[in-house]
Amino acid sequence: MRGVFFEEMDVILLYQLNTAFMRILLIFSALLFTFSGFTQNTLSSNASSDPAARAILDKMKAKYEGYKTMDVVFELDIKLADQPVETQNIRFYKKDKAYRVEMPGRTVVSDGSVLWMIQERNKEVQINDVPEASEDTDILSPSALFSLYEREDFAFVLVGAATQAGKVVQFIEFKPLSEDSEYSKLRLTLEKKNQELVSVEAFSKDGSRFTVRAKSLRPNLILAETLFTFQKAKYPDYYVEDLRY
């Protein structure tokens, strides 16, 4: 199972992170929410989603899309069934459609059209075209966090609010509309005052849970163009495989 997850993460990070981040919330397993007039049964399509939740998500997306560049640090908790939680730090850079994701053992780099996946474990670089936004590989990527609600295969609803670390946060739950989805639900947490992402939690049908927390954000920095292209000279002994058609 562990190996399968990391293979999935490789695919997930291929998504064009062309907005910013979102994914997975702090675990509020003790909280029980009501749907304020919405039920899981009424969420039959993206169009049937809660208008109040959509208005909040529109503001969040506009906020992050307004940044020319971003340098974001995430903390990812991986909880597999009957195993201790593993925590990883992830760093995400974005400039227009270009992005860079740094995580333990691998780095993903894209100039917006070409994607390089640098795998330190086996000293290999894979080159791909950036996947289309409609592909089903973007659920856990930092950029999907801002555009997930626009996907046709999810419906969502505002499920409540609470005070966390002295700040009021709102919770939005996402329901996969396909029975084939590996997730039973996703839960997004936003700070109410400024629509900033706090975290996202993904509940897998096999009992696994993945939680991403936004630790820090530095917007509108001057970022070097070399951050978003593969620098072959830095990896002289790596095998490079071009998988583009």
Image: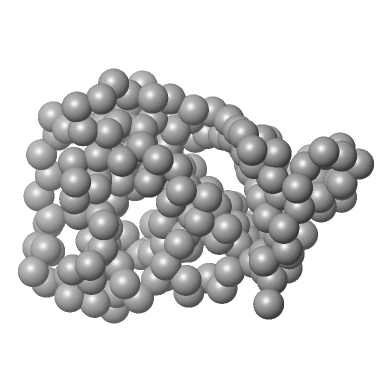
Q: Residue at 31%, 41% (x, y): give it.
A: 1
Q: Nearer the viewer, residue 111 or 106?
A: 106
Q: Nearer the viewer, residue 213 or 48?
A: 213
Q: Answer above or below: position of 107 versus 87.
A: below
Q: Where does the image place residue 138, in percent across and percent down from the top left?
A: 47, 60
Q: Where does the image place residue 73, in percent across and percent down from the top left?
A: 59, 32
Q: Answer above or below: position of 15 versus 102.
A: below
Kindly tell me whether residue 238 is visible in this rendering: yes
Q: Nearer the viewer, residue 191 or 206?
A: 206
- Relative placement, left or right, of 66 versus 197 is right
Q: Quadrant of residue 158?
A: bottom left
- Relative placement, left or right, of 216 versus 209 is right
Q: Where does the image place residue 36, in percent across and percent down from the top left?
A: 12, 57
Quarter of the picture containing the C terminus is bottom right
Q: Residue at 39%, 44% (x, y): give it.
A: 5
* Extreme residue toward the right, this view: 233
Q: Answer above or below: position of 166 versus 19.
A: above
Q: Nearer the viewer, residue 100 or 70?
A: 100
Q: Where does the image place residue 37, in percent across and percent down from the top left?
A: 9, 62
